[in-house]
Amino acid sequence: QSQELSQARIDYHAALLALQEYGTRMVCTGKMHTDRICRFDYLCYCTEAEEFVFFHSNSSFMLPNLGPRRFQPALLDLSSVEDHNTQYFNFLELPAAALKFMPKPVFIPDVTLILNRFNPDNLMHVFHDDLLPIFYTMQQYSDLGDEARLVFMEGWGEGAHFDLYRLLSSKQPLLKEQLRNFGKLMCFTKSYVGLSKMTTWYQYGFVQPQGPKANILVSGNEIRQFASSLMEKLNITTRGGEESAAEEKDEYIVVFSRSINRLILNEAELILALAQEFQMRAVMVSLEEQTFPSIIKVISGASILVSMHGAQLVSSLFLSRGAVVVELFPYAVNPEQYTPYKTLASLPGMDLQYVAWRNMVEENSVAYPERPWEQGGIAHLDKEDQEHILASKEVPRHLCCRNPEWLYRIYQDTIVDIPSLLEALRATVKTRPNLKKAKPASTVHPGQVREPQCQTSVQATNEAMLTVSWQIPWNLKYLKVREVKYEVWIQEQGENTYMPYILPHQNYTFSENIKPFTTYLVWVRCIFNKNLLGPFADVLMCRT
Ligand code: UDP
């Protein structure tokens, strides 16, 4: 044991010497603060000042070296929410020589990922803003493995779903408040700061009304890989793949209930009606009654998930392919304007069917004007504003997060009108949900067509022919593709329109609309199964 201690002391001295000699070193990715993740050697944190510290020495470096632009507005976003001014990261600077006058640093030997959780009490935020981005940031940097240490700097307590964060690494995540326990100055031997935003699909409406992100970069495949990794860690086995005849028959509907607010007032009736309509059993889950892992297990085997709009619907990422998501909206709330779960269900490769239903009957709604404002109360408003809200039939588009009309309407309870819900379901759920048949579609794209060529001939002063031919894409010979087609675009040089053609073979002779003594630009690409587009081959210049 004494040997271990002395070993630790030697390491400590080595670390301290390294910090004094080399200072802090930083290299980052990203051109902008919004797409930046930084890797540090010896990034330190002063728990008294609650500031990160960069120690300058003769051999420290800082890339990007932004000078004062580091504060315009920040070095990077510490949460996955884009450019939120409460989530910025920066550090203070000191010369390494100042260490002599400072408290002895405590070194954190783990490779650390430092970030802000955005709203750890809300399940949608937990998955969308934190768990998925953390999971894929860890995939991006190979030294952020199972042994990595997560450090949450947003300053909240553990929150309702801390166990989910624990699944991401074998080490206990650290909260900002716990850093004090390490002393006045702590230094992270190796750390990454910031989160990948690659997996996020929704913006919450801070600068423009909420909606899907403009440029979604994630597909259902990555969401499902994340979901299976989490389920594996929770020892939840899916039914997927080959099923026994008995299991096949055991299809069921899950109603995800909220028991505190935004209630479905006729839940029992709803469950009976759904079971009757689809001839399946229907079960109810709620975060107040079950543990989240047990809910994931139930949802992962369900054919249909029904729920009021709300964060619990993010659990649809655990549904199997082919399942149906049914989202219910209270009176005066337009489903088209609140689409985090629709967007998730509609990601390419998520392979979920999505149905929105909206209460159109005001009498079927129970509102709570006397509640506190954050639960939709409006008693604190002027009489005039209250009357305006009460008379309105739809919440107008608005920004996050304190719009009283929105909060008033979204926290209503609802008696679900069963006939209109079933009608919406029948209209949208074209094929009966069938989990057995739902296999992931291929996402292998064609390569370029090879050796594209053109030959031309002139028949008469107003008649010409253009023959275009090409070889199959190189990857096609290794693939079984249901349907292979080719697309040819022909553009007369100097014109700004083109004629597109879809062709089944590797050559074609065009004679319509082909003029003699004219130059045509010709593009050719391959298409698999109607929608998997390949790249165009280099443009051909064909003169008749
Ligand atoms: N929640 C719940 N039951 C309820 C009300 C809320 O489980 O009756 C959960 C909800 O799923 C979310 C968190 O509590 O994870 C916060 O709910 P809130 O209504 O604030 O947010 P929303 O669901 O509208 O995103």
Image (cartoon, grey):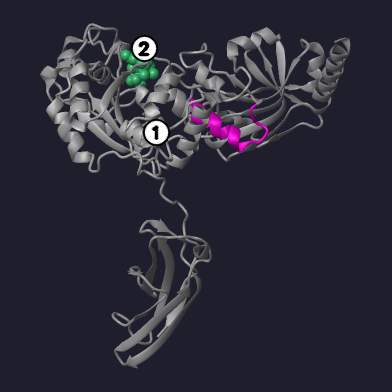
Query: Marks 1 and 2: in contact by CB < 8 Å?
Result: no
User: Which one is closest to the eye, mark 2 or mark 1?
Assistant: 2
Which is the main secondary structure of the residues drawn in magenta? helix
Question: Which residue is pictured at 67% across the width and 7% down the height?
Answer: 181
Question: Which residue is pictured at 43% across the width and 51% down the height?
Answer: 442
Q: Is residue 304 visible?
A: no
Q: Specify the quadrant of the image occupied by residue 171.
A: top right
What numbered label is drawn on residue 289? 2
Type of the residue with mark 1: Tyr
| Image position of 225 with respect to 204: above or below | below
**Quadrant of the image for the C terminus?**
bottom left
What numbered label is drawn on residue 132? none
Residue hosting label 1: 202
| Image position of 12 with respect to 305: above or below | above
Badge 1: residue crowd in 10 Å (few <14, some 14–19, many ≥20): many
Distance between mark 2 and mark 1 Cα atoms: 29 Å
Q: Specify the quadrant of the image occupied by residue 422.
A: top left
Left or right: where 468 falls relative to 103 = left
Q: Position of residue 321 (x, y in %)?
A: 37, 39
Type of the residue with mark 2: Glu
Question: Which residues, given as a range, are shown in magenta?
Answer: 130-146
Secondary structure of the residue carrying numbered label 2? loop
Task: Tell me which label, 2 or 1, sits earlier in the chain.
Answer: 1
Q: Position of residue 500 (x, y in %)?
A: 33, 68
Question: Which residue is pictured at 50% across the width and 62% down the height?
Answer: 447
Can residue 250 be found in the magenta stretch? no
**Quadrant of the image for the N terminus?**
top right
Left or right: where 319 falls relative to 416 = right
Residue situated in front as seen by the camera: 249 or 362: 249
Question: Which residue is pictured at 59% across the width and 30% down the height?
Answer: 75
Badge 2: residue crowd in 10 Å (few <14, some 14–19, many ≥20): few
